[in-house]
Image (cartoon, rainbow, N blue to C red):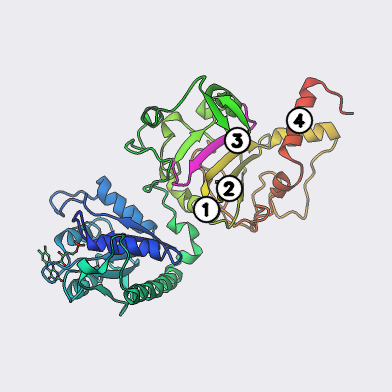
Amino acid sequence: MKLVGIVGSIADQSYNRMLLRFMSTQYRNMADIEILDISDVPMFNQSNDQSDSPAIQYLNHKILAADGVIIATPEHNHTIPAALKSVIEWLSYNLHPFTDKPVMIVGASYFIQGSSRAQLNLRQILESPGVNAITLPGNEFLLANAKEAFDESGMLKDDRTASFLGSTLQKFVEFVGVIGHLNGRADNPGASEDLYATGNCDTTVKDVDMRDPQWLEKAAEKTNAVSGDAYVKLDRGLLTVNQIDRFLKTMPVELTFADENNQFIYYGDQGHDPKDMLASRTPDQVGDPLYYVHPERALKGVATVINNLRNGKTDLFVLPVPGNGPTKHLMHYYKAMHDEDGVYRGINEWVVDLWPIVASYLKQTGKKLVDDPNAKVAATTGASSSAPVEPDPDASTGASEEEEAPTAPTTDASTGASEETEAPMADATTKASDADIFVAEVDETSGASEA
Ligand SMILES: Cc1cc2nc3c(=O)[nH]c(=O)nc-3n(C[C@H](O)[C@H](O)[C@H](O)COP(=O)(O)O)c2cc1C
């Protein structure tokens, strides 16, 4: 479960930030809590709308993508601090990320009241129509005497206090689950995917705008990236950067790499003009968050696929993209990548036209394709006749707007085969290996005997 914890204080040294940090480390088995600071957010001013500013959009996207929110509020003169109020103003003016969002309130203060009045004040604010959050009644955690509550390593000194905090968080996690069902989030696993890539992973290049058309050049400079004839030691070989580039460009598939932060960081164009690619991509897109390289209509499907790969629900998602004429059968494959510890590290997407392979097989074996009268798919397109169709979920396929593609189906974790469509995609993943097929192609063109 993905939660965000908003620090209601902009003080450099904040007990409320310490409280959220404690929660995110101590209860990591209950929920993934990402801490959000509000220090960069300007004071709310209706005459100077800054809803689109990076600081406010950052909070907006993070809250939208989260399953629930924890707000840790200080108490200033019996209410929440002005900085926190100002943030909520921005997030209830033109933006409304809190709408129907489960919110848990906690607070730390110097004195014995432990932020009780600020918490009541915050509860009242969150229920206003512009905010419209859903707070769990009666689930209060108040940390009094905050100055004495933590040890040097930021842990709560009193075990009973820590245990009570854990029980309130547990109740909130259950509450988030219930609200998620009511909101339909349970049926939409992609709802917690951050396609804006507002987070960081350990390879994210900091201080370079992801949307900059020159992202590749600037990020390469920032990281002192090697290029040209510099050697790179790989797991099973030693190649120069030029050799790697040549190698990838001659793969019989078009490759795309999106990292675990949902940033699009590489594609292989095989030397083709973008318009001649199976899935058109352009150099200026490299570095973009995935949100910006897909059309609006495709985002839900994209987020669902990524979330299923991230959470191990499936390891491979296979998507036929029919409608490219009788001599093309495009397939998109989305494969989860993991590091040596099994941690999700992004997606390897490859796009391939299967038709030359099928044609080669038919030519070599003397077989021909015939319609199966019992098949539930349209023989010419591969699209399921019963399944609802949606336009192509990949922004950059180069496929026309009118073309049909199956709705992103749920996939079978073991085979990657679709449960919803009966398109013959299983063959591609479970029978003859790609290597065998491509060897056959080479043999044919080189005149090697079939025997
Ligand atoms: C202007 C001001 C007003 C305060 N009013 C209260 C108050 O009404 N009740 C309270 O318990 N603490 C009050 N405090 C003390 C806070 O508990 C403490 O400064 C601080 O907000 C703790 O949160 P933080 O460390 O996360 O910033 C006030 C502090 C300031 C600076």
Instruction: Tell me whether circle 2 and circle 1 mark residues in contact (CB < 8 Å).
Output: no
Earlier residue among tags 4 and 3:
3
Q: Is residue 247 left or right of residue 62?
A: right
Circle 1 packing at 10 Å, graded few (<14), some (14-19), many (20+), is: many
In the rendered structure, which amino acid carries the disc numbered 3? Asp
Circle 2 packing at 10 Å, graded few (<14), some (14-19), many (20+), is: many
Q: Quadrant of the N terminus?
A: bottom left
Which one is closest to the eye, mark 4 or mark 2? 4
**Residue at the spot 22% in from the left edge and 68% down from the top edge:** 148
Q: Which residues are magenta?
A: 250-263
20 up-or-down from 408: above or below? below
Query: Is residue 134 at all visible to an observer of this figure?
Result: yes
* Residue tagged 1: 310
In the rendered structure, which amino acid carries the disc numbered 4? Val
* Residue tagged 3: 235
Earlier residue among tags 3 and 2:
3
38 up-or-down from 249: above or below? below
- Secondary structure of the residue carrying numbered label 3: loop
Which one is closest to the eye, mark 1 or mark 3? 3
- Secondary structure of the residue carrying numbered label 2: strand
Q: Is residue 393 left or right of residue 143?
A: right
In the rendered structure, which amino acid carries the disc numbered 2? Ala
* Residue tagged 4: 439
- Secondary structure of the residue carrying numbered label 4: helix
State the separation of the CA atoms marked 4 and 1: 33 Å
Which one is closest to the eye, mark 4 or mark 1? 1
Which label sits on residue 350?
none
The foreground one among 424 and 15 is 15
State the separation of the CA atoms marked 4 and 2: 30 Å
Query: Outermost residue, bottom direction?
Result: 138
Query: Is residue 98 at all visible to an observer of this figure?
Result: no
* Residue tagged 2: 405
